[in-house]
Image (cartoon, helix red, strand yellow):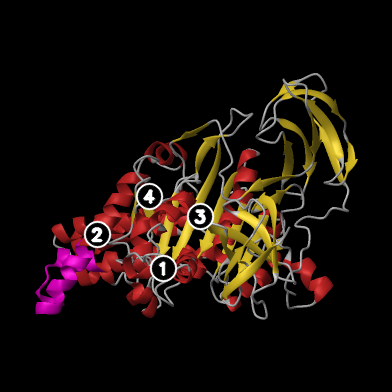
Amino acid sequence: MAGKIIKVSGPLVIAKDLTNPMMYEVVKVGEIGLFGEIIGLNGDEASIQVYEQTEGVGPGEPVINLGTQLSVELGPGLIGQIYDGIQRPLDIISNRHGDFIPRGIDEPSISHEKKWDFTATSQPGETVSGGDRLGYVEETEIVRHWVLVPPDVAGTITELDSGSYTVDETIGKIKDEFGEIHELKLSHRWPVRIGRPYQRKINPNFPLITGQRVLDTFFPLAKGGTACVPGPFGSGKTVVQHQLAKWADADIIVYVGCGERGNEMTDVLLEFPELKDPKTGKPLMERTILIANTSNMPVAAREASVFTGITLAEYYRDMGYNVALMADSTSRWAEAMREISGRLEEMPGEEGYPAYLASRIAEFYERAGLVIPLGSEEEASLSVIGAVSPPGGDLSDPVVQATLREVRVFWGLDAKLAYARHFPAINWLNSYSLYADIMNDYYEKEVSRDWIRNRGHALRILQEEAELEEIVRLVGIDALSPRDRLTLEVARSIREDFLHQNAFHEVDTYTSLKKQFLMLQAILLFHRLALESIEAGISLDLILENEVREEIARMKYHPEDEIDKIEAVQDKIIKAFDEIRTRRASA
């Protein structure tokens, strides 16, 4: 027997007389059949958050609970898709129903008609358990989709055949220890609020290379790590997230547009299909899943979109891939929680957010990590980067503070840098990475033994610049010693020639670790030789007039295949200072 609605308050619906309702059970609300989820039970009344607009829905209409938790369909066909927050394929809905999503519409998340060529790698008679590989499907030219034993199934394979199958057809069977037969298909479902199991989690120890110099060199993120990007309006959070989605050294990208403006998500949808993957030269969409849940879409679905995204990411992690998830922005998700909590008349916490805000944020970020998946001995990772949009850029905002307690990398965006047109506007004085020291061995082995020393040296120069600027404001630059004036000039070079990066320039948009090292090495070499020259009595003005500084400024515009030109800059710097000393000696 169906329950019935007794109250509607925006996205919150109160219903009673449901049949054996459970927390987080999926329900169909009203005559239209709106998609919802039970979030509270009180006697015979159930509180339901509805993931679609509730206009026109009123008391007395039926509510049917479906007996399952909010789940996603996992199988071949996910890559390249654009979903809304509850895994409805937006491109298919657009083709069949027009540009506006009809309420109550329910389209399958992946095609149930398409045939996939399945190649079995296991044999009948083998004993398998959750996570073991049964075979694979070539999902795209970049991604091999491994078909795994579902995590809750174990036993002996009785049937398994290669062939052409839809996701609904049986590819094999497993007999468990109790004699029960489990049919194997190319797809299965998984509840979004339950993290997928793995063997064990290990400490991240190698970097997620992003191609963004300020991130990779100063504040690196490890594969399997967590990072947050807080900043005020207009400081470049979305562009940073886009850059990470485009260039991060991950096998699979899951991009969740959670509550941000629709035109920003439109930029992603238009750009990504045209972009080429730098590693393979194939379209970037062949390793990307997009989830679009913009600010003009139903508020309640923001929470679903975040957990839907991370469940899809865990699925590909379990196949052995390194996955990166970008959530833009978790503040909008928190605001949705605040709205629902207010309608439920719960006791508010700080700034009106629910008391469980911190635990929900922790629940999300704790699903990241470098793990050994079930059925494997090889490492796989899920890295999570969340943008946070505190009102007015206030870092004491409860969402920022709750996030900082969970993440280990803080990329703090600065409005002053953004207004000065310095992008990425990441403040090098208050940002930090707790992974930097852990990954020293990687940098020494893969790049150079001088990487850590250069990083520390450059950060010290920038710190000294901040202290000297206070003195300059008080007494003027002429009161500084030549050594301090040189520090200001070198700090400016680090900021403008190294940290400043143009996301829309075809060369400057991405920089390899080797190029990053050579660029910073050249600037620090200039600093060292200039200091030696000042101590030898050479005028600072003579040093700063040298044309080699133009060579340093142009380094970032040399393509990766012209790395020898960047290496040659160091020789030009040494030669320039030799000429300065010779000129002084002859004078």
Q: CA distance from mark 3 to mark 1?
A: 15 Å
Q: Secondary structure at mark 4?
A: loop
**Distance between the alpha carbons at the discs numbered 1 and 2:** 16 Å
Residue indicated by mark 1 = 500
Q: Which quadrant does the C terminus fall into?
A: bottom left
What amino acid is labelled 4 in the image?
Arg
- Give the mark toward the camera: 1 or 4: 4
Three-letter code for the amino acid on which mark 2 is drawn: Ile
Say which of marks 3 and 1 sits in front.
3
Residue drawn at x 40%, y 40% is 439
Res 83 seen here: no
How far across and down, in percent of the image, does residue 60 sit? Answer: 67, 73
The boundaries of the magenta stretch are 464-488
Q: Earlier in the sequence, mark 1 or mark 4?
A: 4
SS class, disc 3? loop
Q: What residue would you read off at disc 4?
A: 408
Q: Give the residue at mark 3.
A: 210
Q: Residue at x 40, y 57 (%)?
A: 356
Q: Could you say where residue 529 lies in the image, as x and y percent from the top left?
A: 25, 56
Q: Are marks 2 and 3 in contact (CB under 8 Å)?
A: no
Q: Is residue 473 magenta?
A: yes
- Numbered tag placed on residue 461 in the rendering: 2
Residue that appears at 30% across and 58% down: 526
Residue type marked 3: Thr
Quadrant (top left, top right, bottom left, bottom right) of the N terminus? bottom right
Magenta span has 579?
A: no
Q: Residues within 10 Å of mark 1 (few under 14, many from 20)?
A: many
